[in-house]
Image: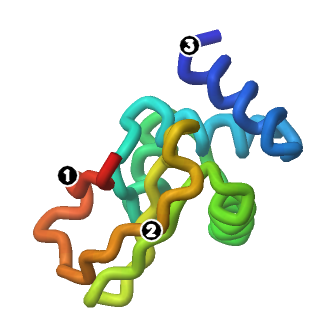
């Protein structure tokens, strides 16, 4: 088990969420790079690269649950694409990013810590 997977399992437990493999793998992506915004497409690609296949409905449901629990924040850009980022423990109550500018490259978009 990697450090990121241990952290992901702990965060899921603390948030009162089920620690399914799908939830753990998804949260690991965000824990590995805090502050990096990922779109649904970015997430799907990253998971498939690791040979983890989640169907689209499961992915959307998990992102919704993780956002509602405060582990992820969601930002909808001017391009109307939702992007998600991990919220570190010390900044859980911060509002979502206020910038509405369209990121030039979603894979390098960073959240404000």
Check the image and report above or below for 8 versus 2.
below
Please tell me whether mark 3 sits on a helix, a strand or a loop: helix
Task: Pinpoint residue 92: horizontal percent, then vertical percent.
Answer: 57, 50
Q: Earlier in the sequence, mark 1 or mark 3?
A: 3
Residue 108's disc is: 1
Which residue sits at x=63%, y=23%?
7
**In which image quadrant can residue 93 be found?**
bottom right
Number of marks in picture: 3
Comparing labels 1 and 2, the label whose residue is closer to the camera: 2
Check the image and report above or below for 65 versus 25.
below
**In which image quadrant can residue 54 be found?**
bottom right
State the residue position of label 2.
Answer: 96
Check the image and report above or below for 100 versus 41.
below
Using a 10 Å C-alpha cutoff, classify the residue at mark 1 as few (fewer than 14 neighbours), some (14 to 19) or many (20 or more). few
State the residue position of label 3.
Answer: 3
Q: Earlier in the sequence, mark 2 or mark 3?
A: 3
Q: Nearer the viewer, residue 8 or 100?
A: 100
Q: CA distance from mark 1 to mark 3?
A: 23 Å
Q: Nearer the viewer, residue 3 or 99?
A: 99
């Amino acid at each position: 088990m990697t450090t990121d997977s241990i952290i992901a399992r702990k965060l899921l437990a603390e948030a009162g969420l089920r620690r399914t493999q799908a939830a753990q793998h998804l949260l690991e992506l965000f824990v590995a790079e805090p502050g990096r915004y990922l779109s649904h497409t970015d997430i799907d690609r990253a998971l498939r690269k690791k040979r983890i296949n989640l169907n689209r409905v499961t992915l959307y449901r998990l992102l919704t649950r993780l956002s509602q629990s405060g582990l992820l924040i969601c930002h909808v850009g001017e391009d109307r694409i939702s992007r998600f980022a991990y919220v570190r423990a010390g900044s859980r109550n911060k509002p979502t990013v206020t910038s509405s500018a369209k990121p030039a490259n979603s894979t390098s978009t960073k959240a404000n810590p």
